[in-house]
């Protein structure tokens, strides 16, 4: 079974950004969330839209966040988007 929605943290991992970036995108209207009570969830369709429909099949599986963490283990050196310096 595939995940249809992601938490803010899961969506951030999938997109390779900080969770606050996802929150900012929601606040600006750049990302359309689904709200369930107080929870803010990001639909898979929104993640795919941001990526231009290029979401790898492994990221749509029920274990997507753990699959992504393996990809993001070592960020590029000197890439400010990844939060590293030098």
Image (cartoon, rainbow, N blue to C red):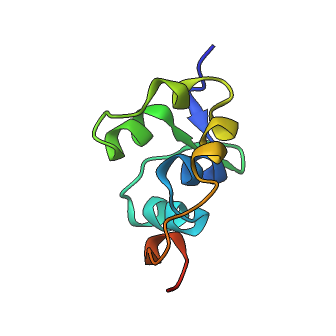
Point 53% across, 26% down: residue: 58
Query: Please, is residue 39 above or below residue 2 in the view?
Result: below
Point 44% across, 62% down: residue: 25
- Left or right of 3: which side holds 44? left
Coordinates of residue 6 in the picture (x, y in percent): 61, 39
- Left or right of 56: which side holds 60? right
Q: Name the quadrant containing residue 70.
A: top right
Residue sticking out furthest to the top: 1
76, 49: nearer the viewer = 76
Point 71% across, 44% down: residue: 37
Residue sticking out furthest to the bottom: 86
Q: How many marks?
A: 0
Query: Please, is residue 73 above or below residue 81 in the view?
Result: above
Q: Name the quadrant containing residue 56.
A: top left
- Left or right of 37: which side holds 35? left
Coordinates of residue 68 in the picture (x, y in percent): 60, 42
Residue sticking out furthest to the left: 52
Q: In which quarter of the image is the N terminus?
A: top right
Coordinates of residue 72 in the picture (x, y in percent): 58, 53
Coordinates of residue 50 in the picture (x, y in percent): 34, 46
52, 56: nearer the viewer = 56
7, 33: nearer the viewer = 7
């Amino acid at each position: 079974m595939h995940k249809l929605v992601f938490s803010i943290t899961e969506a951030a991992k999938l997109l390779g950004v900080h969770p606050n970036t996802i929150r900012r995108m929601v606040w600006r209207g750049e990302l359309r969330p689904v709200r369930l009570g107080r929870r803010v969830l990001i639909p898979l369709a929104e993640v795919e839209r941001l990526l231009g429909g290029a979401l790898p099949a492994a990221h749509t599986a029920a274990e997507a966040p753990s699959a992504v963490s393996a990809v993001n283990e070592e960020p590029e050196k000197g890439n400010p988007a990844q939060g590293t310096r030098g």
